[in-house]
Amino acid sequence: MALVIAASVIAYITTEMDDLLLLLVLFSRAKNRSEKTCIIVGKYVGLTLIVCCCSLFAVYISKVPSKYIGLLGFVPIAIGVKTIFEKKDDDDETAGTPLRKADSFGERAAFIAETVIITLASSGDNIAVYIPFFTSLHGFDFLTMSIVFVVMQAIWCILSLL
């Protein structure tokens, strides 16, 4: 169990360093406690979605013969090459705009959704690390990893609020 905890902490830290900076920026833009709460909720929802998707993919990928797993390394390369050749849309009106003010329930929900989207958009490294890591976890180990991730997310939020 200590090995799973250590591996989970290392996996979290290595994939969430960029999200720590993202949290610092998001919290610096938050104007009140309600907005900070929305950011925290959004980060947890985003992390939950990433872990669930990676877990499902890990279950399916564990059924693929191991000699073909290495070929999955070409997927991020292909996505990167495709992105290079795609035309960028420079007329994006939402780029650089601050997050919405969270006063009403609808505004809080939109604020949370924006945080979730930002979290998911920056999760490429998480996916690349979590899927192989999750293929090695079973039952209680997965529960242990999940608890470590929840605690580490809380530590990240506290660190970025300081």
Image: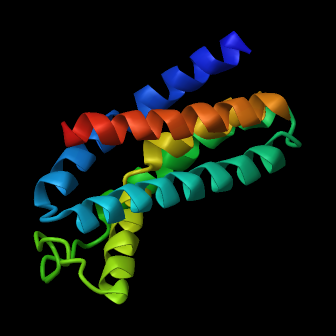
Q: From where the camera sits, is residue 26 visible?
A: yes
Residue 159: x percent and y percent?
Answer: 27, 33
Quadrant (top left, top right, bottom left, bottom right) of the C terminus: top left
Residue 103: x percent and y percent?
Answer: 24, 82
- In the image, residue 141 above or below residue 97: above
Figure quadrant of residue 158: top left
Residue at left offset 39%, top offset 67% = 117
Quadrant (top left, top right, bottom left, bottom right) of the N terminus: top right
Q: From where the camera sits, is residue 70 visible?
A: no
Figure quadrant of residue 82: bottom left
Is residue 132 rendered to the left or right of residue 120?
right
Which is more toward the observer, 147 or 84? 147
Is residue 58 rendered to the left or right of residue 120?
right
Residue 34: x percent and y percent?
Answer: 27, 67
Residue at left offset 51%, top offset 51% = 47
Furthest residue to the front? Answer: 33
Which is more toward the observer, 133 or 64? 133
How was this image coloured?
Answer: rainbow
